[in-house]
Amino acid sequence: MAVASVTHAGAGEPPADRLYAETRELRLQGFLLFLISDCVLFSSFIFAYLYLRNSGQGWPPPGIKHLDVAFAAWNSVLLFGSGATMHYALENWKHGNFIKYMWMLIFTIILGAGFLGGQGYEYTHLIFGEHVSWWGSGIFGASFFTLTGMHGFHVFVGVCYLTVLLMQSAAGVYTGEKYFGITAGTLYWHFVDVIWVVLFSIFYLI
Amino acid sequence: MHVDPAILERTGAIAGGLIVGIVAIYALYKDWATPGVENHVFKLMLLLLGIGAVLAILAGAGVLGNFPTA
C-alpha cells in the first residue's frame, strides 16, 4: 500500500494546505530551537557532573563497586539500533513505502521500550543489589540517576510520541507532502540517541 | 549448559554495534549530498550514531570501560 494521498502545494489547494507548505521551515526552526534548548539542559547537568567528579573524590567513587559496562553496551546498542530504524522509517515514508515505514516505526518503538526495560533492570540491580541510591551515594548516585533518569524520561516521551505517530499514520493523517510530525519525531529520536552517546561515555567509559 | 550472561551481553553489543555502525555510515554516505537544514542535522546525528556504535563495540570487547567486570 502506497502513501494514501499526495497533496501538492499550489494555487488551487485549500488555504490550510498552503499555510502548511509556507510555514514548514518556520516549524522546523522552532523544533530545532527546542532541541537546542534541551541540549543546553543536558549540557548543564553533564558539566556539573564532570566538574564535581573531578573535584577530588577519585574514580571509581568510594562505595561504588561495580557498574555493568557489558550490559550498558548491549542496552546502548538497542537504542542506537532504534535510531537507525527510525531513520529508515522516515526514508521509507519519503519514498512512499508505507508498509516498510510502519514496520520500521514499530521496530523503533519496540527497541525504545526495550532500552527502557534495560534501564529499569539496571536501576533495580543498582538500588537493591549494589545499594546505590539517588540520595545516599554522593555525587555518583545523584548525577547518575538524575542524568540517566532525565534521559530515560525523554526516551519514554519519545516512545509515546512514536506510538501516536504510528496511530496517526495508520489513520491517514500524514500525506506525501505533509509529514512534518514524522520529521520532528525522527529528529527528536536521533537527539535522544546522541545524548545517550554522551551519557554512556561519561558514566561507563571514561 | 551454563552460559555467562556477560558473554551474551558482550557478544550482542559487538554484533549489534557492528550492524548499527554499518547502517549509520551507509545512510550517511547515501544522504551526503542532500541539501537543507534538516538533512544536515540528520547527517550530523548519523555520524554521532556511528561513533556511538563504535563505542559500544569497544565497550563490548572490553577495550573501553571504567569499571571492573563482576
Image (cartoon, helix red, strand yellow):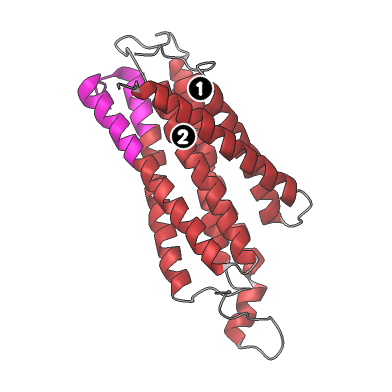
The local secondary structure at tag 2 comes to helix
- Callout 1–callout 2 Cβ contact below 8 Å: yes
Tell me what residue is drawn at x 66 percent, y 55 percent: B38
- Disc 1 residue type (three-letter): Ala
Residue A138 location in percent, x, y?
31, 18
Tell me what residue is drawn at x 58 percent, y 33 percent: B18
Q: Residue furthest left?
A: A128
Is A122 one of the magenta-colored residues? yes
Residue labelled with disc 1: B59
The mark tally for this picture is 2
Residue A61 location in percent, x, y?
37, 12
Main SS, magenta residues = helix
Residue labelled with disc 2: A76
- Magenta segment boundaries in residue numbering: A117-146
Q: Is residue A111 above or below residue A68?
A: below
Query: Considering depth in this image, is A103 or A52 the residue closer to the camera?
Result: A103
Tell me what residue is drawn at x 54 percent, y 33 percent: B17
Tell me what residue is drawn at x 41 percent, y 40 percent: A151
Query: Considering depth in this image, is A60 or A118 the residue closer to the camera?
Result: A118
Of the 4 image quadrants, the one containing the N terminus of chain A is bottom right
Residue A72 location in percent, x, y?
42, 28
* Residue A142 appears in view: yes
Q: CA distance from mark 1 to mark 2?
A: 10 Å
Query: Considering depth in this image, is B1 or B66 the residue closer to the camera?
Result: B1
- Disc 2 residue type (three-letter): Ser
Label 1: chain letter? B
Is A64 one of the magenta-colored residues? no
Residue A142 location in percent, x, y?
33, 26
Location of residue B58 (image quadrant): top right
Q: Residue furthest right?
A: B33
The local secondary structure at tag 1 comes to helix
